[in-house]
Amino acid sequence: MKNAKRILILLSIISIAAFIVTSVAQTISGDVKLGNGVIFAIIGIVILSWVIASFSKHRISFTRIYLILLFSFLFILTTAAYLDINSPADIKNSVTKALTTGKGEFRSRIDLVVQRAELKFVEVTEVVQDNLEESSTEPTQGSKPSDATSKKPTEKTDTTEYVRIGGGILVGADGHCITLKNNPDAKNPSWAELKTFLLKDDTDSIEYDFDKFVCADFAERLHNNGEAASIRVAFVSIWLGPCSYWPTSGGHALNAFETTDKGLVFIDCTGFVSSINADKIVDVEVGKNYIPRSIFPEPGWSDVWDSMGKVERIETIQW
């Protein structure tokens, strides 16, 4: 009888451990939201610790055995229902999926996490004040005008403008105002011309840095590089909903091109490491999942990236 009790507790320990591993595995693979996976894992670890401590005792009371089996059963039942586990094969498949790196699912998911940094804004009044201070230094009497003011304006001149959303101006990671430099001679490219430009452009090779270079900086740089190459580019900011690895809604920046043969295409060049080409095309439509697809696939990486959440709204498409 004593051995039978210990066998039951041992089976509970093995089952709880299996479901904890499965929760973690499904969190890694993206089948379960990060917060929910962590909660199940923590609860499982607490119960597992209590059961193991009870198992190590020389004598276990009937009441304690009953509680161990009850809590173990409830945890296993709840976890199995939430994780959609119907057989031991499902546990094996979950672990195998989490450990599989052939298509880069886990790596691409971790890399996408950094792209969900919140967009930052400053009040318009702050920028206006800074501009007033810069322009307050007027030439003194008898001084020669600067070269910039003495030149006559040409018929077509480059223009610069800030990205305004609501009552604020979008800023980059280091706090500078995102500034778009537009070329009046810029033209809409063909899809082939756009791919040629993207392949040569090195914006996606810049490493993501929360303090120095985030998605807004990537989109700003690609916009300005494209316009400098006489390619018409739009700066796009959107609002994404929660996803499996990001529990809240947040902003994201990318670019758009009006191609002559493929129509409007959205390009996300947000990179993370310099060793991989991160230029991606993505369908941006309110209500649809934001799922980037690599334009220049890399060996060992999945062509289709994981969803960054549903597009809740398109804040701006600024040419």
Image: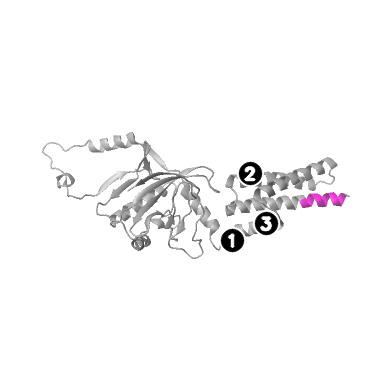
Labels 3 and 2: the sequence-earlier one: 2
Q: Position of residue 313 (x, y in %)?
A: 44, 43
- Kind of residue sitting beneath label 1: Thr
Q: Position of residue 305 (x, y in %)?
A: 50, 56
- Kind of residue sitting beneath label 3: Asp
Image quadrant where residue 39 sits:
top right
Q: Which residue is mark 3?
A: 90
Labels 3 and 1: the sequence-earlier one: 3
Labels 2 and 1: the sequence-earlier one: 2
Mark 2, secondary structure of its residue:
helix
Q: Is residue 234 magenta?
A: no
Dot 2, crowdedness within 10 Å: few (<14), some or many (≥20)? few
Check whether the beta carbons of the residues at disc 3 and disc 2 lie within 8 A of each other.
Answer: no
Q: Which residue is mark 1?
A: 100
Q: Which residue is mark 2?
A: 39
Residue nearest the viewer, comparing 298 with 150? 298
**Residue drawn 53% across the image and 47% down it:** 243
Q: Can residue 213 be seen?
A: no
Image quadrant where residue 275 sits:
bottom left
- Above/below status of 192 relative to 112: below
Span colored in magenta: 2-11
Horizontal side of 175 relative to 144 (left or right) equals right
**Residue drawn 58% across the image and 54% down it:** 29
Distance of mark 3 from mark 1, alpha carbons? Answer: 15 Å
Q: Position of residue 155 (x, y in %)?
A: 17, 49
Distance of mark 3 from mark 2, alpha carbons? Answer: 20 Å
Q: Can residue 93 be seen?
A: yes
